[in-house]
Every structure is written in structure tokens, then in C-alpha cells.
């Protein structure tokens, strides 16, 4: 068995929450993951309830599949970043559905079989980062061509692509710089008072 995006899509489809909320200590979550991994591999089209019934009557099969599931889960868990995000950021961001990411990767042209069955979970952050970079480059390219197209009609020497349209990451960068400057001014003001 393998913990792949096909299995995670089955898990998320039944559970209706992101796989990132998986609780290894929850028997229901564990059984559902076991079912998802088994179904992704065997493609038996059995219901989750039928699977649970079979597992409850066959202790040896349950023990074997549980050991394999645990091994695979722990293997993938080691690649997760150990850094914790600040609590306020955790509350603000919604947990992403990996099944949606899988569909996005397929829509962008990656081979569906590779994405669903062969792609390792630890590769997802790298792919997401590459997709983000590709999106930024595309937006910047489109803005540049728009700028070039309207430049003859604007006639201003100080007109730049950034003045035409500020992209979201540029705005965040400006806000971060302003915040750093504000903190620097505050610290300098405290030093002068002392």
C-alpha cells in the first residue's frame, strides 16, 4: 500500500476535511486512511462500511494492513516541516485540500497517473512553490506586455509597470518594508528619550 494523492482524495472525499487534520490517534481517522490506501491500491469499489466489517472479522488482515499503513504514514510524516506557524496565522488560513491540489496539477498538464499514484507527498511543497513562481512570472510578463502596449499613449517619463498595476506580493513587500521602517523609527525614538 502507498499513501498517495489518490488515497488522500478518497480520505478527503469521505471525511470532507483536509488531510492535514488527520489524527493518528483517532480510530475513525485511522480506519478511514487504511480504507483509502487499500481502495486506492485495489480499486475494489467497496464501501467504507463494508471495509470496516471485513477488517473487524479478520484480525490478521487488519494487523497486517495497520502495520503497513503506520509504516507508510510515518515515512511521509518525517518530511513535514517541524516549524510551527504562529497561532494567529494558523487561525487565518484554511487547511488546503490535497485532492484539489492534485486536480490543479493535472489541469496544469502533469500526467494524471503520476500525480495520483506515483507523486510522493514530500514533493508537494516543492511543486506548490514552483507553481507559485510560475504564476508570478506569468503575471509579471503579462503586466510588462500591457505596459509596453500602452506606453506610447501615456507619455510619462516616470511611468513604470509597478505604477500600472501593483501585484499582490509587491504590495505585501511594501507593507513589510513600511512596518520595518516604523519599528526602526520607534526604536530610535526610544533611544533618544533615554
Image: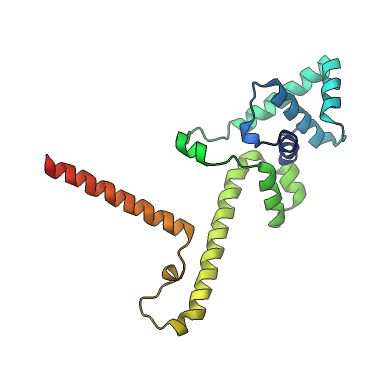
Image height of 183 relative to 21, above or below: below
Residue 51 on image: x %, y %: 84, 26
Image height of 49 relative to 109, above or below: above
- In this rendering, the count of numbered labels is 0
| Quarter of the image with the C terminus in it | top left
Residue 58 in sight in this render: no
Residue 30 on image: x %, y %: 71, 24
Q: Quadrant of residue 12?
A: top right
Residue 9 on image: x %, y %: 73, 40
Residue 164 in sight in this render: yes
Q: Is residue 127 left or right of residue 178?
A: right
Instruction: Using the image as rendered, state which of residue 150 and residue 67 is in the foreground.
Output: 150
Q: Is residue 114 left or right of residue 194?
A: right
Q: Quadrant of residue 86?
A: top left
Instruction: Using the image as rendered, state which of residue 162 and residue 40 is in the foreground.
Output: 162
Q: Is residue 66 left or right of residue 165?
A: right
Instruction: Using the image as rendered, state which of residue 10 and residue 15 is in the foreground.
Output: 15
Q: Residue at x 17, y 42 (%)?
A: 190
Residue 21 on image: x %, y %: 62, 32
Q: Residue at x 12, y 42 (%)?
A: 193
Q: Residue at x 82, y 23 (%)?
A: 52
Q: Is residue 110 left or right of residue 148?
A: right
Q: Residue at x 23, y 46 (%)?
A: 186
| Quarter of the image with the N terminus in it | top right
Amino acid at each position: 500500500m502507498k499513501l498517495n494523492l489518490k488515497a488522500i482524495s478518497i480520505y478527503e472525499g469521505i471525511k470532507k476535511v483536509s488531510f492535514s487534520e488527520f489524527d493518528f490517534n483517532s480510530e475513525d481517522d485511522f480506519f478511514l486512511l487504511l480504507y483509502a490506501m487499500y481502495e486506492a491500491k485495489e480499486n475494489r469499489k467497496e464501501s467504507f462500511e463494508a471495509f470496516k466489517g471485513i477488517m473487524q472479522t479478520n484480525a490478521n488482515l487488519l494487523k497486517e494492513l495497520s502495520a503497513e499503513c503506520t509504516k507508510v504514514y510515518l515515512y511521509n510524516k518525517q518530511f513535514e516541516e517541524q516549524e510551527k506557524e504562529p497561532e494567529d496565522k494558523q487561525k487565518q488560513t484554511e487547511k488546503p485540500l490535497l485532492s484539489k491540489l492534485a486536480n490543479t496539477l493535472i489541469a496544469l498538464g502533469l500526467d494524471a497517473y503520476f500525480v495520483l499514484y506515483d507523486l510522493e507527498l514530500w514533493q508537494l511543497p516543492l511543486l506548490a512553490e514552483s507553481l507559485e513562481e510560475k504564476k508570478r512570472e506569468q503575471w509579471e510578463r503579462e503586466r510588462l506586455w500591457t505596459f509596453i502596449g500602452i506606453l506610447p499613449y501615456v507619455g510619462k517619463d516616470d511611468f513604470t509597470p509597478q505604477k500600472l498595476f501593483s501585484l499582490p506580493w509587491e504590495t505585501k513587500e511594501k507593507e513589510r518594508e513600511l512596518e520595518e521602517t516604523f519599528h526602526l523609527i520607534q526604536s530610535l525614538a526610544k533611544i533618544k528619550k533615554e
